[in-house]
Amino acid sequence: MLNYRELTENFLETKSEKDFTALYRKVKPGLKSYINKIVKDSEATEDIVGNTLTKMWTKIDQYDPQYQITTWLYRIAFNECLGYINERNKKTSLNKLAEFGIEVGDEGFIGGDISQLIEDSEAKTEQDFIDEDEELQSQYTGALKAIQSLKPIYREIVIDRLLNNMKYEDIADKYDLPLQTIKNRILRGKRIITEELEK
């Protein structure tokens, strides 16, 4: 049986429905489990899985092959989950996500942008990738808990930067604050998260 990387390479090369389906079947079980842990809703889980895997088909050219395909997909799924939760309640912010059944762990938040959670993938076994996928899930849920601990003055801005991938300039416009103030608050927010997790 082909592993993640081999299936991904085949799909990248052919862009065929056959190779997409093979990769789809490989990644779907773990992806579904991950999403369900966040949204706690079987119907929503199916929708988000579908949306995520549709993006795997339509946006595969945005995927960087030096990384594991599942890390890219989990990031997409994570943002899809946040979108679903925010749609379910327009006033939801990350300090209230626990009310919607998100499980959070004690694992630490890796400093910097969420995208930096990804490490270079070298020659590894299939089990190495599975272990990394499980660790990545823990990092995401751990990041949620860490962000929840922030005061409102930092939390919403950090959410926009780290989770919504907004540009500093756009965040400054959104909150009508000086660019340097936004940068300072994001930096301070990251430091507070790190300090809290290191206690």
Image: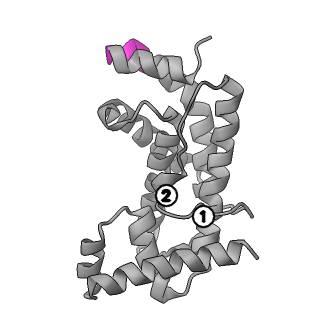
Residue located beneath label 2 in the image: 114
Q: In the depicted view, which residue is nearer to us: 38 or 70?
A: 70
- Examine the structure image and report whether residue 8 is included in the region drawn in magenta: no
Q: Amino acid at mark 2?
A: Ile
Q: Quadrant of the N terminus?
A: top right
- Residue 42 is situated, as x and y percent measured from the top left of the image, at 59, 47
Question: Is there any visible trace of residue 40 in the rendered image?
Answer: no
Residue 103 lies left or right of residue 79; in this view the side is right
Q: Quadrant of the C terminus?
A: bottom right
- The Cα atoms of the two marked residues, 1 and 2, are separated by 9 Å
Q: For residue 84, which numbered disc appears in the image?
A: none
Q: In the depicted view, which residue is nearer to us: 11 or 117?
A: 117
Name the image quarter holding residue 125.
top right
Residue located beneath label 1 in the image: 143
The magenta segment: 14-20
Q: Secondary structure at mark 1?
A: helix
Instruction: Tell me the residue at 30%/32% (across/down).
Output: 61
Q: Amino acid at mark 1?
A: Ala
Question: Is there any visible trace of residue 80 in the rendered image?
Answer: yes
Q: Is residue 78 above or below residue 157?
A: above
Q: In the depicted view, which residue is nearer to us: 106 or 77?
A: 106
- Residue 88 is situated, as x and y percent measured from the top left of the image, at 46, 66
Residue 51 lies left or right of residue 96; in this view the side is left
Does label 1 or label 2 sit earlier along the sequence? 2
Q: Is residue 163 above or below residue 31?
A: below
Asked if the residues shown at circle 1 and circle 2 are in contact, with their CB atoms under 8 angstroms apart, the answer is yes
Q: Secondary structure at mark 2?
A: helix
Check disc 2: other Cα within 10 Å, few if <14, some if 14-19, many if 20+.
Answer: some
- Residue 183 is situated, as x and y percent measured from the top left of the image, at 37, 79
